[in-house]
Amino acid sequence: MPQTVPPFAELLAGCSRSAVHLETRDLYGVAEEDADFAAWRDGWEYDHADRSSWWNGFHQSVADAVARGVAIRRARVVSEPASEYIRYEHSCTPQNLTAGEDVRWLPRRLASDLLLPGNDLWIFDDRLIRFSLFGGDGRFVADVMGDAADVVKRHAEAFEAIWERAIPHQEYRI
């Protein structure tokens, strides 16, 4: 039977302590971002000072969780030189910071001795894990949930190793 994965906002609303997000791809083909990515490629940039022009439900969910005391951290493992998509993502990261996330970047060249998870993931309160599966073209395929304590623990340890080594967004230059 297919597994039903709750919406991200619901998972985050259920958090009381922490949510961590690991991104490991150099290209994402997220349909909701296609228009903005295309505009960015043509020279358009977000006006981060005009929050109403970019703030959305995701940002509000993050801000609400942070207001409740949930620490939200995002680590991105990236190749260098950075892909065009990663340069776009870097330019958008101030939005994540404004919402309350802490974001760090780990150049792949500094990760060779680390064991990296095979898929992007979110871990909620060290008890639930949501893996995001993507196709080779970067398009989203599916989310898969799990709560096996040993799987969550191994992935949380991997995230912490990445986080310790990663460079805070404000210091990472592309």
Image (cartoon, rainbow, N blue to C red):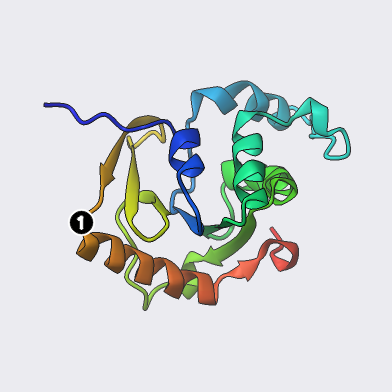
Image x and y of residue 28, in percent? 48, 37
If the image is split into quadrants, where does the N terminus sit? top left
Give the farthest residue toward the right: 49
Amino acid type indicated by mark 1 = Ala
The foreground one among 6 and 144 is 6
Q: Position of residue 159 (x, y in %)?
A: 42, 66
Query: Which residue shows up at 49% across the image and 74% down it?
Result: 110
Kindly identify the residue that appears in the image at 49 percent across and 43 percent down: 12
Q: Is residue 155 above or below residue 34?
A: below
Is residue 159 something that shows in the picture? yes
Q: Which residue is mark 1?
A: 148
* SS state under label 1: loop
6 up-or-down from 91: above or below: above
Seen at 62% across and 58% down, the residue is: 103
Quarter of the rendering containing residue 174: bottom right
Instruction: Left or right? Give the position of 70 relative to 126.
Output: right
Instruction: Name the foreground residue: 108 vs 50.
Output: 50
Above or below, 50 relative to 172: above
Say left or right for 142 vs 93.
left
Number of marks in the rendered image: 1
Q: Is residue 78 visible?
A: no
